[in-house]
Image (tube, rainbow, N blue to C red):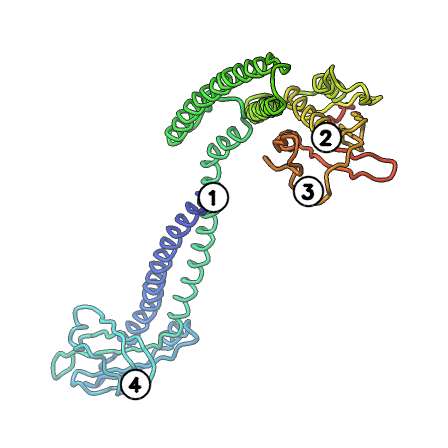
Amino acid sequence: MTAHKSSLFSRLARRVAVVLALGAATLITAAWFYARAAADEAYDRLLLGAAFQMAESLVVADDRLSFVLPPSAFELLGLAQRDRIFYRVVDPSGETLTGYGDISPSADLSRSRAAPVFANMAYRGVEVRTVTTARAVTSQSGTGWAYVIVAQTTEARQALASELTTRAVILVAAMSLLALIGSALAIRLSLRPVDQLGDILRQRDPQDLTPLAATVPRELLPFVTSINHFINRLDERVRLLQRYIADSAHQIRTPLTALTAQVSLINEDTLSPDDRRHLERVRNRTAELARFTNQLLNHAMVIHRFDSTQLAPVSLNDVARKAFRATVPITIDPDMVVSFEASEEELTVLGDLLSLREAIANVIDNALRHGATSRLEVRATRFGDLGRIEVCDDGPGIPPEDWANVTKRFYSSRTEKGSSGLGFAIASEVAFELGGQIGFRGKTAGLPFCVYIDLPLVKEDKG
């Protein structure tokens, strides 16, 4: 039994999904870093512009440094409505000229002489972004450096970074979903040759043992080659089996026929009563062996034919008539009344002529040997959408409790007369292979015991 695993499509789809998920996670992480950098750059420009405007407002008058806060600086920083602004102006002596005196960046103020210095720090319990600019100031006492420190909370830039990241996540998720759907379609289309190869194998006729001639991708060539190799080996085994069955039938039936003939040539007049009884037993055993051998070979023939023969429309009336003529012996007891009744309408079933005739013949033979005492009736009739062959006799019939078992091989409800238990088994297997069944109807008042075979009729094409 082949173990069932997940489909190749689902395995490939899961792997593609994992790759896409890792790629999406990488892109989202990169987008987050990019969004933070973009937000910092945008708001740093505003912060730097405000610092430059404040630095330009430093004026030396009467040998004193004065500062007038330009409204435009606050208007520029006011673009970030969520944030609070803090500033500090330091004169050349290091004293706070105006602003919040406790704003003290960790970097040395003199570093801002070469270029503005940005820094992050905590101020009054919140995160702020600072920029420090320097301006040379000349007075009567000499030249010095004044510094402008502007700090801004980071709420606006964090909101901008979150918004940019959210948009990037939505875009990456949409693209990943489209990529996954596209990959699934591509995988499904790529795996279509596998499904087509499976359809070719399922639709292949059982008796067709020629190598596959399907056009498949290069990756499937080893698989097709292995299938063709197996088909060739199976074809060789089937041919050997056919030859073995034919040889066995010939080698077994020939000595049995000769043995039966030799037994029949024995002169019973010269034998004692005991020897005559022994001779009768030999004849019965020989006949039983011949019958049993024929049934075994016919059973093998039926099994083989369903594996190697194409089913075709068969007239149920004709095949039943042939089985009746072949089974009822010419030397039957003249007191035995036998009859065959064909259906008034043509009954056509899809089957194999030889196998179906063998099945009906086994049922008739079983009725003759183990059932009928003075009457045997065989008829073909229609039963709904089924064609039915009925074999009825006036014998005691088969007990209902044995109906479920008599179709099993080597089972018999009788122990006398050399019952082999293969007749109903052959009939049941043929009926099953043709989509039908074998059934029984018990003996009731006025009605004999019947064994019937139901087979589906071929529907007429009304188009």
Distance, label 2 to label 1, CA atoms, is: 47 Å
Q: Residues within 10 Å of mark 2 (few under 14, many from 20)?
A: many
Q: Which residue is mark 4?
A: 99
Q: Mark 4 or 3, which is nearer the eye?
A: 3
Q: Nearer the viewer, residue 133 or 378?
A: 378
- Disc 3 residue type (three-letter): Asp
Q: Is residue 104 above or below residue 352?
A: below
Q: Which residue is mark 3?
A: 402
Q: Mark 3 or 1, which is nearer the eye?
A: 3
Mark 2 lies on a secondary structure that is: strand
Q: Which residue is mark 1?
A: 182
| First reached walking from the N terminus: tag 4 or tag 1 | 4
Q: Quadrant of residue 64?
A: bottom left
- Disc 2 residue type (three-letter): Pro
Where in the figure is residue 137, as x and y percent of width and height? 18, 78
Q: Mark 4 or 2, which is nearer the eye?
A: 2
Q: Nearer the viewer, residue 399 or 133?
A: 399
